[in-house]
Image (cartoon, grey):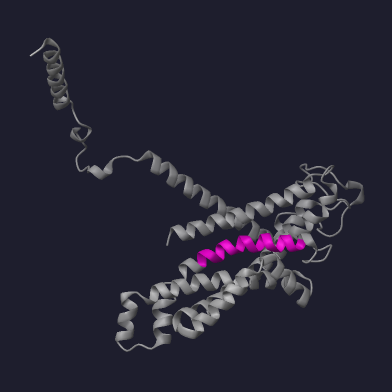
Amino acid sequence: MSVDSELVGSAIVRKAKGLATRPRSSDAPRPAGATATDAPRPAAGHRLRGIRAGLVLAWLVIAVVIAWAIVPWLFTGQDPISGVPAEKLQAPSLAHLFGTDAIGRDLFTRVVYGAVNSLSGAFVAVTVGLVGGTLLGVLAGSLGGVIDAIVMRVVDVLLSIPGLLLALSIIILLGFGTVTAAIAVGVGSIAAFARLSRSEVVRVRQSDYVEAAFGSGARLHTVLFRHVLPNSLTAVIGLAALQFGAAILAISTLGFLGYGAPPPTPEWGLLIAEGRNYVATSWWLTVLPGLVVVAVVLSANRISHGLGRNR
């Protein structure tokens, strides 16, 4: 055996002995009663705390905006309709948190009083989409066959039409206004609710306990209301929270285009539209109401994701 081979062999033996005598992390002493799964996971803990903090913040934003809609006079004592011409186009300050508009009205006051129009419109839109879409989806998923094919083809037609175009068509037929805009937005969301509710109903109907209920002699409506609906509405409720934010954004868009509430009614989309001519000199007229809309929409989306994660 050569000298080189002897050196290599001794090095391998020394390395093997070192590995054998090196204490392993699993051999380290643990406190009494500790198990292998008790090891700290700081990354997961930080992520969980971040998720909870974001969800709490989202609920806080929604709660504040709902309070604006219910009791706006608790947040501001100024008039949202009439203003002081001498105080027009003032920048944000302690006296006027969001500044003033072109005729001296306090912008924060108009945003606060506009919450009732935007939130009520979004609530009507989500209700129309939730009720109409869920009924169609449950009907198609529970009966199947020809009815399922017909309903889903109608849903496909609704999905093929852009939402804004469909909403504008309905508004032209029914007339302008916040309620009309809300109904138009709700009709546009029926297809999404119908597809999701149908898929959930079909999934639940294939469960063993539903088959057992049918085997025991239960009728269709009994099984539907006792077993199928309670176990298939969780995802639909999560979609409703997501559509609430989308409805606020859609109603604000229609208000910006002039199809929502008429002036001088305070409505978030209309407020942004009124300030677009002053973007170069008075940025707060569009930026601050826009940030409120963005905060509410993002909060609704965050709550929707939280509901979906807890399924």
Q: In which quarter of the image is the N terminus?
A: top left
Q: Residue furthest front?
A: 2
Q: Is residue 21 left or right of residue 150?
A: left
Where residue 96 appears, as percent x and y from the top left, is 79, 46
Q: In which quarter of the image is the C terminus?
A: bottom left
Nearest the camera: 192 or 50? 192
Q: Quadrant of residue 202?
A: bottom left
Q: Is residue 67 left or right of residue 76?
A: left
Magenta-drawn segment = 237-255
Q: Is residue 236 left or right of residue 261?
A: left
Q: Is residue 251 magenta?
A: yes
Q: In which quarter of the image is residue 15?
A: top left
Check the image and report above or below for 65 versus 51.
below
Where residue 85 appears, as percent x and y from the top left, is 91, 51
> Residue visible at 74% across and 47% down?
287
Check the image and report above or below for 237 versus 278.
below
Q: Is the magenta stretch mostly helix, strand or loop?
A: helix
